[in-house]
Amino acid sequence: MHKSIKNNNKKRGRFAPSPTGALHLGNARTFLLTWLSIKIQSGELILRIEDLDHPKVKPGTIKEAVDDLIWLGLTWNEGYGIEQKQLNPPYIQSQRTDIYAKHLSNLIEKKLVYPCTCSRKEIEATQSAPHAGESPKYPGTCKNKFQSWEEAYNALPDSRIPIWRFKSSNESISFVDGFMGEQSFNNSELFGDFAIARHQQGAGYMLAVVVDDALMNISEVVRGSDLLDSTPRQLEIYKALQLHPPEFIHVPLVVAPDGRRLAKRHGDTRISTLRKIGNSPEKIIGLLAYWCGWAEFGEEMPANELLKRFSWNTLNPENVILTNEIKKYLNIQD
Ligand code: GLU
Ligand code: ZN
C-alpha cells in the first residue's frame, strides 16, 4: 500500500543490460533515450542485470557496463550498485530465481504452460519455409503430452532439459507503442506456444523480464525495436499473472552499412574500447545525439545538454547506420 502510494506519480524506467557482451554504441543510444525520457519527467531509473543467459555471460562485463554508464554520464538511482536504495532487491536476475519459480507455479496451476522437449532442429523440421534468425514457429508438439516437468525431463537424454512454453492466444494483441504507435500481433500465428523459461524454476528471459518490471514498478520500458515483437508475448504473461504492464517504447537500432545488426566484423564499437582509444564521453554522446537528429555531426556535449533537445516527436524514426565516415571519426579499426 505504502509503496504504491509513494510510487504513484513518479515515472520509473530501467537499464537492463545483459552481460553476455559489452555495451556497444547501439546499447548506449538506447540507454541514452531511456535516461532522457525518465530525466525530463523527473522519474527514477533502476539498474537491473539480466544475466540469465548463463553459458554466454562473460566475466567482468557487469563491472564494465557500470563503468561505461557512469563514464557516459547516464546515472541511475536505484538497484545494482546503489546500496542506499534497494526497494526490490536483488537486482541481479540470477539471484531472483525463487521469485520466478513462484510466478511459474502460478502459471502451471492455471495450466497456461507446459514442458516441451523439442530441439530447435526438430521444430525446424516441421516448417515449410525456414525463418531466418528468429525462432521458428512452434507447432504444439508437446501440448498435452506430459503430465509433469519430471516426466518430460525423463524423456530426454541427460545432456538436455525441457523448457516451459506458454499457450499463446489466437487473438490479436494490440498495444500503443510510445514511439512506434499502434501495434497488433497474433502470437499464435507468429510464434505458436512460446518459450518463457529455459529452466525448471522459470528463470528465462520472457518470464523474468515481466516479473521484474512488474515487481519493480517500472512504468516505462525503452528498448530496441528488435524486441518489439516480444512485447505482445510479454503482454500475455502480464495478463495471465494479473500484473500491470508498463508503457513500451521501442526505438530504432544502430546498424551496419548493410542494414544488419552490429556485429564484431563491423569493427569494435564497444564503449569501453572507444574510451580506451581516446574518445571523450562528450564526443560519444554528441554522435548519439546526431543519430537521434538532435545535433550536427561532430558536435560534442554532455548527456545533460540533451535534456533541452529531447523529444519523442523529433527522434529520427529510421535505424541509423554506422558508416565508414563515423568509424573513422571514432578511430574504429576494422
Ligand atoms: N536484457 C535485454 C537486452 O540486453 C533487454 C531486455 C528488455 O529490455 O526487455 O537485450
Ligand atoms: Zn515440444
Image: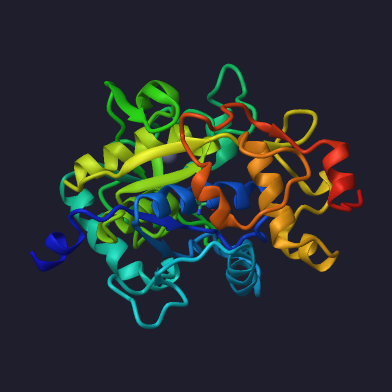
The colouring scheme, among rainbow, by chain, secondary structure or one colour, is: rainbow
Asked if residue 32 shows in the view, the reply is yes
Q: Residue at x 89, y 53 (%)?
A: 331
User: Which residue occupies the foreground of this view, 237 or 216?
Assistant: 216
Q: Which residue is drawn at 62% across and 52% down?
A: 28
Q: Is any part of residue 166 visible from this angle? A: no
Percent of width and height locating residue 42 = 34, 56
Between residues 144 and 31, which one lies in front from this camera angle?
Answer: 31
**Image: 96 above or below 172:** below
Nearer-the-camera pick, 197 or 285:
285
User: Horizontal and vertical percent for residue 90?
Assistant: 36, 74
Decide if residue 85 is on the left or right side of residue 271: left
Farthest residue, direction left: 1
The location of residue 301, given as percent across then percent down, is 66, 54
Quarter that holds the N terminus: bottom left
Q: Exactly how many numbered labels are in the figure?
A: 0
Outermost residue toward the top?
128
Residue 280, compared with residue 264, is above or below; it is below
Q: Quadrant of residue 95?
A: bottom left
Relative to residue 7, is residue 203 drawn left or right? right
Q: Quadrant of residue 270?
A: bottom right
Q: Is residue 320 left or right of residue 19?
A: right
Q: Position of residue 314 (x, y in %)?
A: 52, 30
